[in-house]
């Protein structure tokens, strides 16, 4: 083939350090816009970004020119620097070290996008840990509870 034409969609989840409830109304919508800009700068197309006060969900296309770990590193590093400029309350902001990345088939993009849009509703009934465990189980991923909550 003379061209390389990937169409890969990823659903990424990561939390604030120690799942600290720091993503509030003051920065939430700005943060999502900023994350969208970061994604565009690394040739990813943001589809939906959302979350809760202590974690983020990102649905985006994934280009062929960057690794997943580099994508996550760039997103976390750049957004963390930006958040720290938003006032004294955010000076000690950090993302947790780990993350979860899940493949999304094109037929499920709309469903996942709606799921991300309804994060606040989900978390009235379900904790972050319960939600994340469901993802790991749905994707049949082996994990060790001993290490799960210190790194995500």
Image: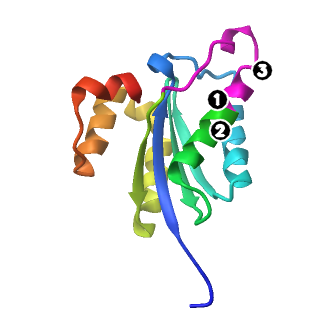
Q: In which quarter of the image is the N terminus?
A: bottom right
Residue range of the region highlighted in magenta in the rendering: 79-96
Where does the image place residue 30, in percent across and percent down from the top left?
72, 33
User: In this view of the protein, which residue sits in the foreground, 13 or 28?
Assistant: 13
Q: How many C-alpha atoms fall within 10 Å of the one at disc 2: few (<14), some, or many (≥20)? A: many
Q: Is residue 84 part of the magenta span, yes or no?
A: yes
Q: Which residue in the structure is indicated by mark 1?
A: 28
Specify the quadrant of the image occupied by residue 90. top right
Discs 3/1, front: 3
Q: Is residue 126 visible?
A: no
Tell me the residue at 66%/27% (across/down).
80
Q: Which residue in the structure is indicated by mark 3?
A: 85
Q: Element under label 1?
A: helix
Query: Pointers 1 and 2 in contact (CB under 8 A)?
Result: yes
Tell me the residue at 69%/54% (across/down).
42
Q: How many C-alpha atoms fall within 10 Å of the one at disc 1: few (<14), some, or many (≥20)? A: some
In the picture shown, does residue 57 fall above or below 18?
below
104 horizontally vs 72: left or right? left
Measured in 3D between alpha carbons, the distance from the residue under mark 1 to the one under mark 2, in whole angstroms, is 6 Å
């Amino acid at each position: 083939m003379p061209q390389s034409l990937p169409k890969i969609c990823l659903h990424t989840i990561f939390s604030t350090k120690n799942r600290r409830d720091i993503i509030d109304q003051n920065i939430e919508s700005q943060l999502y816009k900023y994350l969208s800009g970061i994604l565009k700068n690394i040739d990813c197309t943001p589809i939906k970004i959302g979350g809760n006060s202590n974690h983020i969900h990102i649905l985006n296309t994934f280009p062929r020119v960057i690794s997943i770990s580099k994508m996550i590193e760039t997103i976390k590093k750049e957004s963390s620097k930006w958040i720290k400029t938003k006032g004294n309350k955010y000076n000690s902001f950090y993302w947790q070290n780990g993350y979860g990345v899940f493949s999304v088939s094109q037929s499920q993009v709309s469903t996942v996008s709606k799921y991300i849009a309804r994060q606040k509703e989900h978390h009235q009934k379900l904790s972050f840990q319960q939600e994340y465990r469901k993802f790991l189980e749905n994707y049949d991923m082996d994990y060790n509870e001993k290490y799960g909550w210190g790194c995500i």
